[in-house]
Image (spheres, helix red, strand yellow):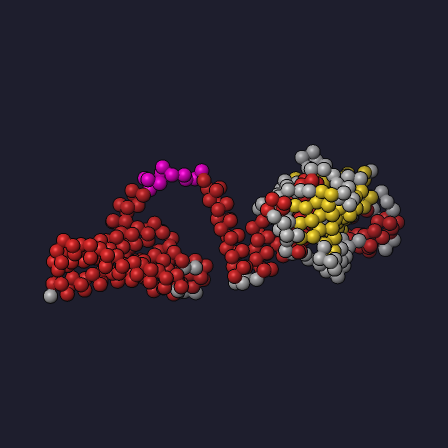
Amino acid sequence: MTIVISFLAILLLIVLSAFFNVSETSLTAASRARMHALEEDGNVAAALVNKVLSRPEKMIGTVLLGNTLVDVLAAALASHIAVDLYGEVGVAYATGIITILIVIFAAVLPKTYALAYSDRVALIVAPIMQGLIYVLTPFTRAVEFIVRNILILTPGKADDEANILAAHEEIRGTIDLQAREGTVAKGDAEMLGGILDLGDLQVADIMVHRTKMETLDIDEPPAKIIDQIMRSQYTRMPLWKDEPENIVGVLHSKDLLQALSRNDWQPEKLDIAKSATEPWFVPDTTTLRDQLNQFLKKKIQMALVVDEYGEVQGLITLEDILEEIVGQITDEHDNPDSHIRLQSDGTVNVDGTVAIRDINRHLDWDLPDDEATTIAGLVIHEAQTIPEPGQVFTFHGYRFEILRKSRNRIMALRIKPIATSPVQSSTARSSG
């Protein structure tokens, strides 16, 4: 009779061990977002799950304490029964049998089930776990005290930045994984990745370079300025005086039309300077996240980008930043994008000023953009020289042929993805 009771006690202890394991796995694997949504809908069990997870050290302490206790008791009872039946050698039998039972029925099986149905199981075990946490609080507090004093010796707040970076990379890795598995659409994954990139990119990385800016000479006759604006695809254009780098204002087509209306639609009566607004200058090192916040705060959609010496380097608009998230935005007034031209032989002709990020997104390539912003800049960086038309370079698994050059600027290139060995793809080579 005593042996039967002992066997039943061992079975109960294995069940308790399985409960602790299934609770730990399901609660840690449960979707916090789903639990939060369920709690908002009034689900009491979800609220308990969130409460348990709000103090993970208490939950872990309770699980470890309970699991260790029941496993040790089960092993002790099994050894006692085995010694009574088989003598000293029974300890070996008991150790082997109880280990197999605990591994299979108290660990692997419940943990596997908990991983497969983590949300459902977490909602079931949370009320019981909350009660156990309350009952075992005196013991877990002692464990927490010991753990906290040990953790004082480990890295703490000084590593917060590294922890944030790790969380940032974990989110990005999760997005990439979900995209590969088909859970998240490719376009959605790119948008989520674009949001994460806003803190890493600077306005200099995506601005319209000064050589590509459409600007107006404020001293030109008003009729000519109106004609230039009507021919342009842009509604806002910088105004310069004396020299193109001296930006003195920004002219909006709507403000110009209002001024024309007030002057009986007679251009010669216009004072262009009065219709312009003050230019807004921002440093080229401003992050896109900060610039986006400033655009929203100031309710201004265009800014001039200047370097450390105050020289205008280009301009950036709210649309430029949004395109980093959602991709190219076009309307009926935009000119067709001819900067990236696919060829029938599998090559791609691109302008030298095309941003590496744009061509990567457009063609799903993986050209590096750490050392250069544009395709031309990447070629010059890798070649360590300003190449001539006709030269060919191979690096990073792509073949670059220089098509046109103006002074020291690469105007056009032909690019083709190729299969290269790791050594060949990491070094540049050229041919005349």
Magenta highlight range: 148-158
Figure quadrant of residue 110: bottom left
Residue displayed at 33% across by 62% down: 109
- Looking at the image, residue 48 sits to the left or right of residue 367; the answer is left
Task: Tell me the residue at 22%/53% (across/down).
Answer: 72
Label tally: 0
Is residue 154 magenta-colored? yes
Between 37 and 220, the residue placed more toward the observer is 37
Q: Is residue 431 left or right of residue 30?
A: right
Q: Quadrant of residue 44?
A: bottom left
Q: Nearer the viewer, residue 327 or 177?
A: 177
Q: Position of residue 369 (x, y in %)?
A: 63, 45
Tell me the quadrant of the picture where the C terminus can be found. Answer: top right
Q: Nearer the viewer, residue 328 or 178?
A: 178
- Above/below status of 241 relative to 32: above
Q: Give residue 338's quadrant in the image.
A: bottom right
Left or right: 253, with 189 as reference point:
right
As for residue 292 lying within the magenta part, the answer is no
* Picture residue at 30% right of the left edge, 50% below the top: 61
Percent coordinates x, y for residue 29 in the rendering: 40, 58
User: Which residue appears at 46% of the width and 42% of the height?
Assistant: 160
**Residue 227 visible at all:** yes
Q: Is residue 304 visible?
A: no
| Residue 152, position as x, y percentages in the image | 36, 38
The spot of residue 361 in percent (x, y) is: 64, 54
Residue, far top? 309
Q: Quadrant of the N terminus?
A: bottom left
213 above or below 34?
A: above
